[in-house]
Amino acid sequence: MKAVTSHKSLLLLLLALTFWIVFAVFQNSTKIWAVFTLPVSLNHWKYDMKPSCPEIPLNPSASPTKTELRVRKVLEKLEQQIPRRPVTRFSTTTSAAHSTATVLNPRRTYCVGDQLDVLLEARDHLGRRKKYGGDFLRARMSSPALKAGASGKVTDFNNGTYLVSFTLFWEGRVFLSVLLIHPSEGVSALWRARNKAYDRVIFTGHFVNSTSQVYTDCALALNSSVELCQYVDAQDQEAFYCVKPPHVPCAALTHMHSKNNNVSYLSKQERHLFERSNVGVEIMAKSNVISVSKCNKKAIPKEKCKLGMVSTIPSGHVWKNIWNPVSCSLAPVKTKDCLRGKLIYLLGDSTIRQWIEYFKTTISTLRPVDLQETGKLQHQLFVDLDGELNIQWQKHSYPLIGSLVYSVKEIESIARIIDRTGGGENTIIVISVGQHFRPFPINVFIQRALNIHKAVQRLLMRSPDTVVIIKTENIREMYNDAERFSDFLGYTQYLVLKDIFQDLNVGIIDAWDITIAYGTNDVHPPQHVVENQINVFLNYIC
């Protein structure tokens, strides 16, 4: 009897012990699981030290496969438009002098509103007809005396022929132009070289160590066996790296500057294609002037410009230095009255900083707020207390190219700025990115554009009455370092941006087409061009 009782006691003891072990494991596993299910921190940069520069894992709160597939899908669509034509001999590349341009169905005079078509036949330097397309062309019509201009639409038949279509927007004497910016072989070389490496620009990080400064190399990617500081956006997993200075923490990084690296991924033969005499050469040297009459055609009334309108090619024209969109009309707007009560974020590069400089000169009651930053890239905030107006400009995060030293103490990605914005009917966000991305592989820009798109999507879900406007890149200097800054590199980003944001109810200011129409060829166009970009913006919001 005692033996039975002893066995029962032992059994009960074992059951109790088993229950306690299961309970303890469950408690610990719950704590462990909680670590993986906590929301990602919204701190925009996390500091970490890595012995090398590995692939950065994507944020576990989002689907890695989905993010990667979206980048790949955009890239594949873009690559379908890129020729694969290696340079064998300079003589076999496209020659503007030997190519021919023929006006189809020519007339003595044309009417306003007509479409004029030009058939272009590309030929090489030996006069032989090209059998493939891919040349980077820029079509433009202009009347300098009328301060008028517009882009033309280029259709590539991929067989060496192109159709260039001009919409005749105004009457008078009109000059037609088709420039060969780069031959298809040059386009192919730029695309290959762009996606080969990250080191065309050298970044130098300034670390503060008590009263002294330490300088180290920084980049979007570093091939180094030494210890690195890794600055990672906690949500989107975009990273920037610096070589870690000895005995200085990664968090001590305060400033940055950059310079061009003396490196090229183009062959000597390819570089010849980008010499000044071979860039932006006129094809329509003859028969390039036409006469346009009004012909008593009545103007078709257009609705006022608003968000979400479909962009056309061309998107408008300049007449008497005023921009006129094709698909909508712009009304005169009093800037201060329009902006009354508004909270305006201008986010991006120096081409959108031009806007805040314009507002400073045109709204006399704006007053600066000292944010205790220095340098040209400092965060700028202006307020008008009477008009309850708040306008601020903030630079985008890395890559940010500049020979002048700039602070990175408060550097923040555009996506994170948008995420911490409440939004509302009086909140306007204008975004402009691109120029600083041209020297780097295109996937860097695609990922940034997708991350901004996701942030805008989140903003419009929680505050659908917020106004978001995308300003595309300006064209820039034609003969300035093609491997890093060619407009072809910018054009691919222009296509990416329009493709990614087409599903959102945002406004598009087509600065690419506007600056072609004005013929500025300047990354920072003159004030009258900036003023007309802003006029589109004012019509979107008032």
Image (cartoon, grey):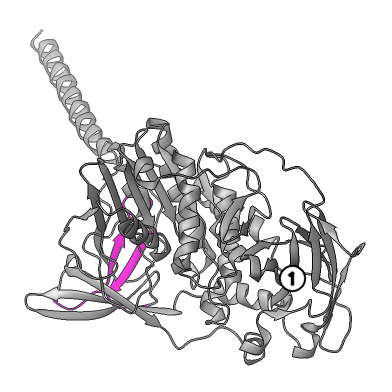
User: In this picture, is 453 found above or below 14?
Assistant: below
**Residue projecting furthest to the top:** 1
Q: Horizontal placement of 402 versus 516: left or right?
A: left
Task: Find residue 357 and report its horizontal and vertical position in percent.
Answer: 34, 61
> Which residue is nearer to you in this view: 52 or 150?
150
Determine if residue 196 is in view. Answer: no
Determine if residue 324 is in view. Answer: yes
Give the residue displayed 54% in from the left and 54% down from the top: 497
- Taking the magenta stretch, the answer to whether it contains residue 240 is yes
Give the residue displayed 38% in from the left and 74% down from the top: 222
- Taking the magenta stretch, the answer to whether it contains residue 488 is no
**Residue projecting furthest to the bottom:** 268
Task: Find residue 223 and report its horizontal and vertical position in percent.
Answer: 39, 76
User: In this picture, is 223 found above or below 290?
Assistant: below
Answer with the quarter of the image where residue 368 lies. Answer: bottom left
> Which residue is nearer to you in this view: 453 or 339?
339
Q: Amino acid at mark 1?
A: Phe
Task: Find residue 337 and report its horizontal and vertical position in percent.
Answer: 35, 41
Is the N terminus in the top left, top right, bottom left or bottom right quadrant? Answer: top left
Q: Which residue is mark 1?
A: 175
Could you tell me how many numbered marks the image carries?
1
Q: Horizontal placement of 268 versus 307: left or right?
A: right
- Read off the magenta span: 224-247
Q: Horizontal placement of 9 versus 414: left or right?
A: left
Instruction: Bin the neighbour count of mark 1 within 10 Å (Cα to Cα): few under 14, some 14-19, many 20 and up.
Output: some
Give the residue displayed 67% in from the left and 90% down from the top: 269
Is disc 1 placed on a helix, strand or loop? Answer: strand
> Which residue is nearer to you in this view: 531 or 524?
531
User: In this picture, is 324 found above or below 466?
Assistant: below
Answer with the quarter of the image where residue 387 lies. Answer: top left
